Amino acid sequence: MSDKSPIIVWIRRDLRLSDHAALHEAGKSGRPVIPVFIRDHTVDQLGAAPKWRLGLGLECYGKALAEKGSRLILRAGPAREVLEELIDETGAGAVWWQRAYDPASVERDTAVKSALTDREIDAESFAGHLLFEPWTVETKQGGFYKVYTPYWRAVCEREVPEPLPAPSKLATPQSWPESEALEDWGLGDAMRRGAAVVAPYVQLGEQAAQSRLGAFTSGKIADYDSGRNLVAEDGCSSMSENLSLGEISPAQCWHAAMRAKDAGKEGAETWAKELVWREFAYHLLWHTPRLAESNWREEWEAFPWNEDERRKEVIAWKRARTGIPFVDAALREMYVTGRMHNRSRMIVASYLTKHLMCHWKIGLEWFEDCLIDWDPASNSLGWQWCAGSGPDATPYFRVFNPITQREKFDPDKAYVERWIAEGQDNPPKTALSYFDAIPENWAMTPDDAYPDPIVGHDEGRKAALEAYENRDF
């Protein structure tokens, strides 16, 4: 194959121009570059909110490529078949992409690489989704890490390469292959009327991500240690939305954190630890793929979780009508903004899995449908950590008290009042927006009486501890 043949750069969850190794190297080659996004089974299986957010991201990324004189080709179908068709159409001699680490993507990419190599096509994968490739971080015994703190100690002094610049130029092919129309894919259809409610809270694309990072590391990061837990305050970075689609790279975030740390901003290292928590989630997912769909601690397969989603308690939880203000406020924040404060996520997950004794997969799948910052590794690890079935030194007897947690982290009830309309004479727009976002068949209005708790804290904690103490393993 001629070294002047086109290079197909297979775009996945890496919707940026800068610090994109595959795109950078393709640009340096001087060969024609054909960026391609494939709507395959991994896209079709996405929940409503992340699929809608992906559609917005693709539209924005297509415009960014167009500004470089390039374009984003869209094709639907099994990845291997689509790539082979494009190779036949364009005469491409190479397909390059950046690695993914979830089980479905690993299986797909392995098969694609094997098939293309058999055709003598240059199939090459690049790093870029993580700071540290999962197989490069090992314990002294040669295994993988199962506890976060030792993992942090192992990587915190590692060198992270400086982010790559965006390609100055992308050579174009003599003729472009046909592209499907993004609007025909209907990626936002399942969001229904919720899309209009969530849209104002989206910060879309690479430029917005860089601005968000710059604002955070020049200001709020200094007080991140305390500010990150105050749920009514804007003390977090909110970078998860952009990291989830690769609109910014973890290396760009890491180096910004290190610059802030060098400038004496006390919260910078704590935020860097949150970036490494994301790394740890992928480290575990790579080495133990069961994290995504079954109990990480295999002995918990015998635990009698409730798995009936038709139970009234589960329905009340999903509809943010548990009667526990902190839990309901957090879920409503998610329905209105597409995101949820990290402290709130722990309280919501603990209440479902401990107070209601429901299987963590019910919550995991609900978040997968509702979060615009959904991430396969972080979502899985977060739910299993809260449930007790994941990697943690004290897994089962941690039961968050949603009453005292609210008193500690929302002392003025500002967060609760921001998101719960019932009982307020003049509820804010944020609280009212919940009723515009939810399905109409829920038949809820701001004038409804706020419910009594479906399960109180003391009752739920006692039942949870009794169940854990009587477990058969």
Image (cartoon, rainbow, N blue to C red):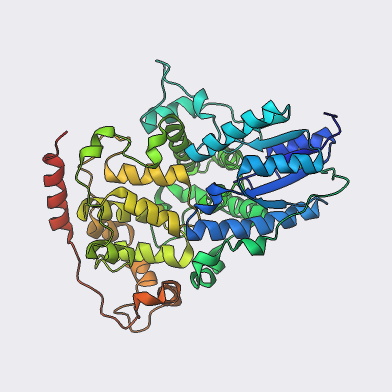
Report the residue that reaches farthest toward the right.
174
Looking at the image, which is closer to me, 140 or 445?
A: 445
Q: Is residue 346 visible?
A: no
- Residue 365: percent from left, percent from top: 39, 53
Give above or below for 391 relative to 340. Answer: above
Q: In the drawing, does residue 154 fall left or right of residue 55?
A: left
- Residue 316: percent from left, percent from top: 27, 66
Looking at the image, which is closer to me, 159 or 63?
A: 63
Report the residue that reaches farthest toward the top.
141
Q: Which residue is drawn at 81% across and 34% down?
A: 28
Q: Residue at x 51, y 56 (%)?
A: 50
Q: Which residue is drawn at 57% across and 40% down?
A: 250
- Residue 412: percent from left, percent from top: 32, 67
Q: Which residue is drawn at 59% across and 63% down?
A: 186
Q: In the drawing, does residue 303 fall left or right of residue 243?
A: left
**Quarter of the N terminus within the rendering:** top right
State how many labels appear: 0
